Image: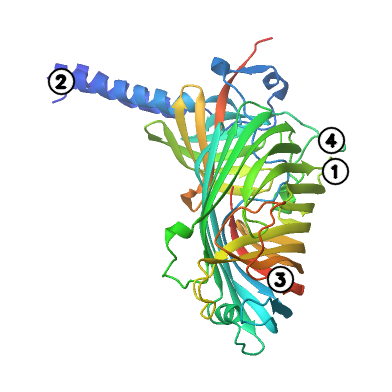
Amino acid sequence: MKKPVLILLFMFFGLTLFAQADADAILGVWETGSGKARVKIDKSGDKYVGRIVWLREPKDENGNPKVDKNNPDAELRAKPLLGYSMLKGFEFIGSKKWDNGTIYDPENGSTYSCTITMTDDNTLDVRGYIGVSLFGRTDVWKRVIIKKS
Amino acid sequence: MINLTERLLVFLFVGLITFTAWAQEPEPDEEEEDFSMYADAELADGAKRFCTNKVLDQSPNKLISIGYDFQGAHDMTIGAWGSIPSTTVRVNQVSGIRINGNVPVISKTNMLLNVGYSYWEANYTMAQSSDNPLVNTLDTRGLRTAGILATFFKPLNEKQFFLIQAQADLNGDYFLPDFQPLTYLKYSGAAVYGWKKHDRLFYGFGMSRTYRIGEVNYVPIMLYNYTFPSRKWGIESALPVRAQLRRNFNPRTLAFFGYELEGQSYRISNIEGINGVKDPELRRSELRIRLTFERSLKDFIWISAQAGLRYNWNFNVDEGDFFRGFFGEQPYLLENSLTNAMYFNVSINLVSP
């Protein structure tokens, strides 16, 4: 009686931990395809989110820290871009894919549906699209290693 | 009856599930993090960075565009040929729909392939009927263009890129769905090598095979896209085909002033009365000097309104499609001319992310 219960429990925990490791593989700091920004992907509850943690040009033309001036919501236009949540609501759906999230483009203030696929341990295909995936664009993000000072 | 060991296992199971849920990382605090630590970093596994094909604040790529083009009244003079005398007719309008699509098929940082299509109509409305066979076929059939386009952008590194474009069009006085034979396809294309010096400057040089002057020609091409440091103004150009000054009021409202040379060679298969002529080709080319206003109506749906002067560049007819070049002396079958006209173009567009 004891042996089957133990085996089932070990199998359950093993699979759970394995799936969790796959899902959390996306965690870390990533550089966008243009190299203009780095985004840190964290976990919030059971969702994955990403914040801008570095900008190649952090200041605007007046020397002030860049803010989200293109946001369609006027109340958010004074919010600093550094620390801005640009990835929201991603869920791990298996096969190295995170879906059902959105990506925000501060360059034009638009929010797109988004799917993220991990093509290798250090590469993400981030596809923003409108309605259906065909009408979209894929940006390839690379993992960055933070140098410890 | 559950024994002690099984009870212990169930307790551990419930406890672990609870702990796992409790141990979920809390929502990141946007205020507390020290962002300076992310400045000193390097790409994992030594990956390369690549330049993109756009400069900051450039006008968005149109995935789907459905528009209407209208040219106002002007005079059309058709040259004499054989026993058919020269004639001048009044054209009340030239109008038609313009549908374009341009979808990224491969969209990676190190490679971009867009495939597009186009369908344009030019329907002529004459003020009076005419015996001239070319005027008749334009009046009753109009001109159509249906084409496919592929654009391949290959960045080599952060600064340099290749761009190759290929296009095939079927142009003529046909009606849909009865296309002309594919032997009348017109092929054009361009190959460019360029540099992206920084986020606001992108330029390149290359060669093109083009029908923009109405007949096939081979011309050097220069791409130049630039956004001024103020980010309120910019230049978008592919010389000598088009150039425009851009004004960015905000990311969702743009205006342009500039020109574009539009042209194609149209196979006219319904000129009755010009006996003995094989494959007459109408070399149609026009320079459009225009003001354009583009604005996002809602999210990714943009409207574009354009108005300006249509300046006639070429409206002659050749027998067959051949290369004349800038210095060729082959005579035209018909030497025609158009007076200039005002025009407008409006379109609804789905723009790319």
* Chain that bears disc 1: B
Q: Tell me which amino acid carries mark 4.
A: Asn
Disc 3 target residue = B344
Q: Which mark is residue B230?
A: 1
Q: CA distance from mark 4 to mark 3?
A: 42 Å
Q: Tell me which amino acid carries mark 1.
A: Ser
Front in this rendered view, residue B228 or B219: B219
Same chain for the residues under marks 4 and 2 in the image: yes
Same chain for the residues under marks 3 and 2 in the image: no
Q: Is residue B2 left or right of residue A144?
A: left
Can you say whether B140 is above or below A114 in the image? Answer: below
- Classify mark 1: helix, strand or loop: loop
Q: Residue at x 85, y 38 (%)?
A: A61
Q: CA distance from mark 3 to mark 2?
A: 78 Å
Q: CA distance from mark 2 to mark 1?
A: 71 Å
Q: Tell me which amino acid carries mark 3.
A: Phe
Disc 2 target residue = A4
Looking at the image, tell me whether mark 1 or mark 3 is earlier in sequence order. Answer: 1
Q: CA distance from mark 4 to mark 2?
A: 65 Å
Q: Dot 1, crowdedness within 10 Å: few (<14), some or many (≥20)?
A: few
Front in this rendered view, residue B147 or B285: B285
Position of residue A137 measured from the top left corner of the image (x, y, whole percent): 54, 43
- Classify mark 2: helix, strand or loop: helix
- Classify mark 3: helix, strand or loop: strand
Tell me which colouring the rendered structure shows.
rainbow
